[in-house]
Amino acid sequence: MEEFDILFLNVHRRYLNHSAKFGGFLGIYLLSAFVRQEGFNAKSFSGTLEEGLNHLEKNSTSMAGLYCDFDNVTENKFLCRYIKEKYKLPVIIGGPQATALDENFFKDSKCDAVVRYEGELTVLELMNYFLEEVGELKNILGISYFENGKILKNPERPLIKNLDALPFADENCYLIPQNFYRSLSLMTGRGCPFHCAFCHEGAHTRTVRFRSVENVLAEIDQYLKKIGDENFFIFFTDDTFTLNVERVKKICEELKKRRKQKNFEWFCEGHIHTMYKNPEMIKYLADGGCIRMQLGIEAGTEKVLKAYGKNSTPQEIIEVVKKCRDAGIREIYGNIILAGANFSREIFEEDKKFALELLEIGEGTVELGVVTYWPLAETKMTNQSKDFGIKICDAEFLTSVGDFPQVETEELNRLKIAEMQTELEKEIFAKMKEMLLKRKIPTERILSWFPPEKSSMQRYGSWFGLLTQEKILYPYYEMLKLKEGFESKDIENIAEAHPLRVVSLYKNIKRVNENEIEISGEIFSREEFEIIMLTTGKLSVAEICERLNLKIDEVMKTLNRLEKNFLTVYSKH
């Protein structure tokens, strides 16, 4: 049993039979790093509620800190009360949803204090108060607490201006190792100057503070010293990574230098309008090793984007996607929000049209998620929902875990909106599959989706996920990736190449009649089937011609049809 001064927990139930994923959610780990620097023994854990309970049972702590977001309020209510009653410990709660916790939460959870907004200095003062008996609650800035039957809110704490003074989160902050040496998550700044109507971050921390480039690189260098030669990934998790062009340029130039010694790639979030106005930034990002980026797409109409306060247009989105694609950024992710501002069947059709257009333009780089509007606390849309043409049906997130709409309109109820979400997902999936089958994606790009050698990291991305589900397409491209097979365009002397089937013949063949067979939707004659049976890689094209006493043009006509349908590749030996 280990003993801690404080244990920070970010726990969710195992909703929809999925364990919560916490890649890039740094808050409680940064808190551990800070209070450890101040002399306290702290650890953090993210996982399921059951796992959190087990860790409390197995370890000893003098205090607990719980992370509260829109999705785990009930978990925190239960867990806080459980800790208070069983272990008699002080419990504090923070996180984005904490500012919206009401009187009932305080009564039901019995929590000692809620930390509002930025937490390091506030948590430190609370630890000194509860563990060292220093100070008074009424004098601690940035907290709310329950006293004499009412919530008391102390004045806000000033934001930390010098982020370079904060320590780095490292493996010592983790209660359970989280593959620390396979990926690194870090924030290069805090706050957001944009005022998107649906976003909690932009609603309360509009002052942007950046870490110095030197400080960011120092954290990366510390990490690089600890890893071996295995490929790894860096997640830059802040919303405003692309806000300052010169800063982005400097970071990317330094990352490019480091990538010559260590093999890594990275992710960041990009702001559409900033990148549209500064297209040179996209080249900096690509040259620096950014292969995956999240863009704030959200909608396909200018009317909706304006209502959101996105400060971007559909045409700007298209231009940024094109430039990211051409620069070599392989994965461009964005969401389409349904049931948001001014939502209607007409808006939905425009969103659908725009989504399919983006897929075409992306040529295998664009990935789109379909979500419904979440009524996050303190946002403009939540506070003034009527102005956006929506009615919030579930502001407490009691009926949905991201799997059902929480709003409706005069025209569309929640069930209809859910049906539209399914419809758009199916349309996107069908479009992606069509693009693969019609060879609208460059082969080189498809091969880039496969995990690199000497890497235990899984590649994520919906394109690669779709490819792995295709029983013919996947083995075809895997052969090309392994260089065990090649496309005809890459063969100098086709007569000497050996045509090689990539899937089992008997599993994919269907007899049409006595003279015809069907393979992968293509009808072949009995004579053509004689050629197909010899595509085992054991004979060259010339040898097949000789064995069947056919001219090379006759054989290649059949082989070209097989290749077009992803059934054969060519071995050089």
Image: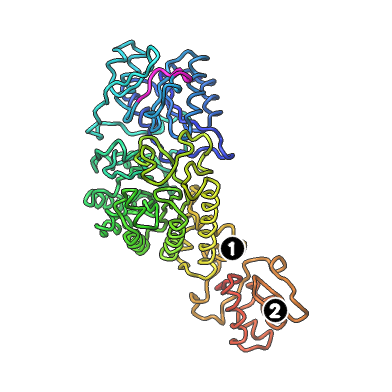
Whole-percent x and y of residue 342?
40, 50
In the image, 500: left or right of 351? right
Q: Is residue 515 above or below residue 311?
A: below
Res. 15 image quadrant = top right
Q: Between residue 242 and residue 308, name the one nearer to us.
A: 308
| Residue 463 at x, y percent in the picture | 50, 58
How far apart, in angstroms, are the residues tagged by discs 2 and 1? 21 Å
In the displayed structure image, the side of residue 352 where residue 295 appears, left or right: left
Query: Which image quadrant for residue 25?
Result: top left
Nearest the viewer among 208 and 184 is 208
Q: How many marks?
A: 2
Q: Which numbered disc covers residue 529?
A: 2
Q: Secondary structure at mark 2?
A: helix
Identity of the residue drawn at 29% across and 12% down: 135
Residue 99: mark in rendering: none
Determine the image quadrant of residue 329. Answer: bottom left
Of labels 2 and 1, earlier in sequence is: 1
Q: In this picture, is 543 found above or below 259?
A: below
Residue pictured at 55% horizontal, 59% vertical: 467
Residue 204, horizontal then vertical, whole percent: 30, 35
Where is residue 497? Give x, y as percent: 56, 77
Q: Locate residue 208 relative to residue 569 in the image: left or right.
A: left
The residue beneath circle 1 is: 475
Secondary structure, mark 1, is: helix
- Residue at x 62%, y 83% (from the top left corner): 555
Residue at the limit of the structure toward the front, as seen here:
410
Question: In the rendered image of this protein, does residue 347 appear above or below residue 37?
Answer: below
Identity, as a three-letter code, of the amino acid under mark 1: Pro
The region drawn magenta spans 107-115
Q: Amino acid at mark 2?
A: Phe
165 in magenta: no
137 left or right, relative to 541:
left
